[in-house]
Image (tube, rainbow, N blue to C red):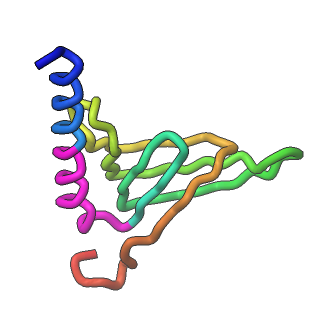
Amino acid sequence: MSHTDELDEFDAELELRLKREYADVFPLFRYCVLTHEATYLCNRLERHADPQAVAAFLHVVMEDVWVWDRNRPTRIIPRVEIHTTQDITIEVLRTGDEPGA
């Protein structure tokens, strides 16, 4: 087996582990935030838009965050702030009225 094949196999295993972890933790979070750089799951979310001449400047603050990044030693982060003019998709996975919320 070549080194390239070994790296591909290792990469595929990391991706599979990340997908399994995502499926396990997904039900624990209220929001899914998608940016052009990352996918985040979080339970607290604040968003602010500052209109500019060309595009809105967005500021998103998340707490109790899980980030999709297989290269991190830990994917749980206490707080994340995003400052961008790019598109951000925020999905509400569950409301605070549901059991376990």
Quadrant position of the C terminus in the picture: bottom left
* Stretch of the chain drawn in magenta: 16-30
Residue 52 in percent (x, y) is at 83, 46
Q: Is residue 40 left or right of residue 81?
A: left
Q: Residue at x 21, y 37 (%)?
A: 12
Q: Is residue 8 left or right of residue 93?
A: left
Q: Which residue is at the front of the view, 7 or 81? A: 7
Place residue 69 in its image quadrant.
top left
Image vertical order of residue 80 relative to residue 28, above or below: above
Residue 17 in percent (x, y) is at 16, 45
Q: Residue at x 63, y 51 (%)?
A: 87
Asked if residue 19 lies in the magenta stretch, the reply is yes
Residue 54 in percent (x, y) is at 85, 45
Place residue 89 in its image quadrant.
bottom right
Image vertical order of residue 4 relative to residue 31, above or below: above
Which SS type dominates the magenta stretch? helix
